[in-house]
Amino acid sequence: MTLGAMLGPAVFAQSHISIQWSRGYGGSRYYCGIESAVAADDGDLWCICGGTDYSTKTHVTNAYRIDGISGDLRFANGLQTRLPPNPFAWEMTHQLLATDAGVAVLTGTVSGGQFQVFQGAFLSHLDASGSPARVSSVVPKGSQLQEAFWLKHGSLIVTADQSPLSIRKLSASGVLLWRRVLSADFVLPSAAVFPDGSACLSAQVVSSPPTRPKLQLIRLSPSGQVTKQIAIEAAQGVVADGPEGTCALLYSSSFDYANSLRLASFDSSLRRQWDSVLPFDGLGGRKYRLHAVSDGFLAVALTGGDKRSANVAKFSRAGKLVWTEPLTDEFEDLVFGAGWAYFLTQSHDVHNEAFRVSRVQFD
């Protein structure tokens, strides 16, 4: 059964997406914006969403754990009063990480009104019922949390910008192992970490004029040292790890509301191997994502409209377009497990479910 058939009117003439199950979560009079989602090593899907319970007129932040095999809801626990700092004094964002022992959450914090101050980020591991354990400060005041990656040998990589761009490697408990600081002109990093601990990172160069935007592509050693970097004529981009240490970059050509997207591959010395155009435009503001799969790459982009329409394109490892098709409206996220993915959509209106999860496989 196709994704379109499960989620609404058929939208694929010949779908390259098959679905194993599709379930809705959250009740009526409840809006829940998905902040983060991750597939744990046991296959379960964890989500954190924040929003409003209109029946009680309160703001809520909930952690959901969903059985990966059946789609049954294991629990939906409130986190609003259990994650630091005081939620009434700080604006909070959350990122979930799949760890060797389960799931952890990074909480980024902002204070202030018109002039905001980044108050750093905090790490806490969640137990099997979603309760947070001891909290560690992992990003100091002045830096804005961007991305985090769990490494299989029990450590994590965290990127932050604004003061200036920095990369940190931390132990599982949040102890700093090393820190590397890059140019203050680099913002909005996107990183891909390879099995040996080296990384590929892209960042927007804010000192470039809007008429000729630049994107910096950087290779880092396992100890965080810059081994190679180049400037690319592009506005923004996201990266993914390719085979044999290659770095794939999905990038936009301008900051326009709608702009062309391209997918390129670079070897470990940042020599461009190929560069392919996507068959659809994407929205400005880096509203696109890139995922490495076993035989290529999936590029997903929001393409406009009031209902958050999106498209997905699959490319081979050699940069050849394999297929493309539209996704259902109200696309929110695509989370990969071992051999499958979770496709998340959510309504931006109050109705009988807050969000929907479908476990899918791609051709």
Image (tube, rainbow, N blue to C red):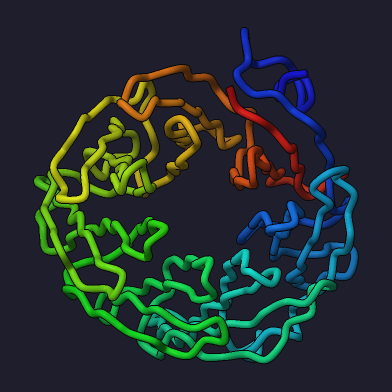
Q: Nearer the viewer, residue 42 or 345?
A: 42
**Residue 285 screen position, x and y as percent:** 36, 49
Question: Is residue 346 positioned above or below 199 on the image?
Answer: above
Residue drawn 79% across the image and 79% down it: 131
Residue extending farthest to the top is 13
* Residue 33 as seen in the image, left or right of residue 167: right
Of the 4 image quadrants, the one containing the N terminus is top right
Foreground residue, 153 or 345?
Answer: 153
Could one spot residue 351 in this view of the protein? no
Vertical arrangement, residue 133 with respect to residue 235, above or below: below
Residue 181 at x, y percent in the picture: 23, 79
Q: Splitting the image into 4 quarters, where does residue 144 fall?
A: bottom left
Q: Is residue 159 above or below residue 278?
A: below
Q: Residue at x 66, y 30 (%)?
A: 361
Q: Quadrant of residue 87?
A: bottom right
Measured from the top left, where is residue 325 in percent x and y?
Answer: 53, 19
Q: Which residue is at 30% across, 34% downward?
A: 263
In the image: residue 192, left or right of residue 325? left
Q: Quadrant of residue 344?
A: top right
Looking at the image, how many numbered discs can be counted on the residues? 0
Q: Residue 139 appears at what percent x and percent y?
A: 43, 85
- Which residue is at the front of the view, 122 or 286? 122
Instruction: Report if residue 59 is visible in the image.
Output: yes
Q: Nearer the viewer, residue 298 or 355?
A: 298
Residue in the image at 11% along x and 54% along y: 230
Viewport quadrant of the C terminus: top right
